[in-house]
Image (cartoon, rainbow, N blue to C red):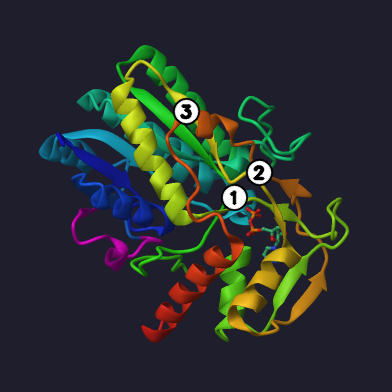
Amino acid sequence: MDGAILVTGGAGYIGSHAVLALCDAGHRVVVVDNLVTGFAWAVDPRATLVQANIEDAAVRDVIAEHGVRAIMHFAGSVVVPESVSDPLKYYRNNTAASRSLIESAVAAGVAHFIFSSTAATYGIPDVVPVAEDMPKRPINPYGMSKLMTEHMLGDVAAAHPMNYCALRYFNVAGADPQGRSGQSTAGATHLIKVAVEAATGKRGHVSIFGTDFATPDGTGVRDYIHVSDLAAAHVDALNLLIARPQQSHIMNCGYGRGYSVNDVLDAVDRVTNLRIERRYEGRRAGDPDALTADNARILSTLPWRPRLDDLDTIVAHALAWERKLGERGA
Ligand code: UDP
């Protein structure tokens, strides 16, 4: 295949799985990552790793040197509460850095751009499952920083010979089924990561944030998608952008069904044969009752189909990775 794929944030959780999927599909991959939150060892050895910030001029050299024809852009800051306390960090690392990267892409004539967006662009939806054309009203700077980048891409694709696909992720979890990567960041706040940390003895209990949501069991409902399915969606999106260079896309990435916090913890108990302590606590600020994807668009646009759509499988893969991290002392 002609030209390399540049993956920003390829040493991070989702980016490293995209690198695996791209390499497995036979693409040439170059990763740009500043390794602030990512890990060099998480980058598939088949890929080239360049340690740099995405707004650095070095990115233009990488694009030229490797003949980059498409960019998958994962780099950014992803902690929602931090975005509330330090909004300018999010507008810098997500919005402004993306602007620089897109500018480099346009200057170098990169034809295709795939962007990590988020269900946080919807805020608290009026109805679920939420579809792409429903109102985008982010309730935190993280969601807004990503939505602003979507808007930039829309404007740039109208003005320049570049098409794009923004993929709005729902709750990403799990790990590579072959154990090559997983969620490795310390200080995790995401439910499945927290739960497998409890299962491996890294923490004593799991707090359940809120029991009075308008959901069947009162705990929050989310659409958990396996990270390897998500990575596969990126490869399919890339193929579509290449095949139809006049079209751009915005697509939800979720399975279209929800599990409550209790459902997730039940799965962890099943998979581990443990009974992890649950502590019922108050709500976190800004948590919607339920957030699930209407995934009709991705199913009708891409050949992509969920392959790991099973909560116990997601948990089992997350747990296997957590145990592996434990063995290496992480
Ligand atoms: N949650 C919880 N305890 C935790 C972490 C999360 O009860 O330690 C709940 C949270 O309130 C939400 C769901 O689990 O209903 C998923 O939260 P997460 O932080 O994983 O992702 P989010 O949906 O906030 O992006």
Q: Which residue is located at x 44 percent, y 83 percent?
A: 326
Image quadrant where one finds the C terminus: bottom left
Which residue is identified by label 2?
140
Q: Is residue 130 magenta?
A: no
Res 301 label: 3
Residue 39 magenta-highlighted: yes
Mark 1 lies within 8 Å of ligand 1 (Cβ measured): no
Toward which corner of the image does residue 6 lie, by quadrant? top left
Q: Is residue 268 above or below residue 119?
A: below
Q: Position of residue 322 (x, y in %)?
A: 47, 76
Q: Amino acid at mark 2?
A: Asn
Q: Are marks 1 and 2 in contact (CB under 8 Å)?
A: yes
Expressed as whole percent of the image width and height from the top left, the position of residue 238 reads 33, 34
Report, in whole angstroms, how far the alpha carbon at label 2 lies from the one at label 3: 30 Å
The residue segment tinted magenta is: 36-51
Residue 328 picture location, percent across and down: 36, 83
Q: Identify the secondary structure beneath mark 1.
A: helix
- The reply to whether callout 3 and callout 1 are in contact (CB within 8 Å) is no
Q: Which mark is residue 83?
A: 1
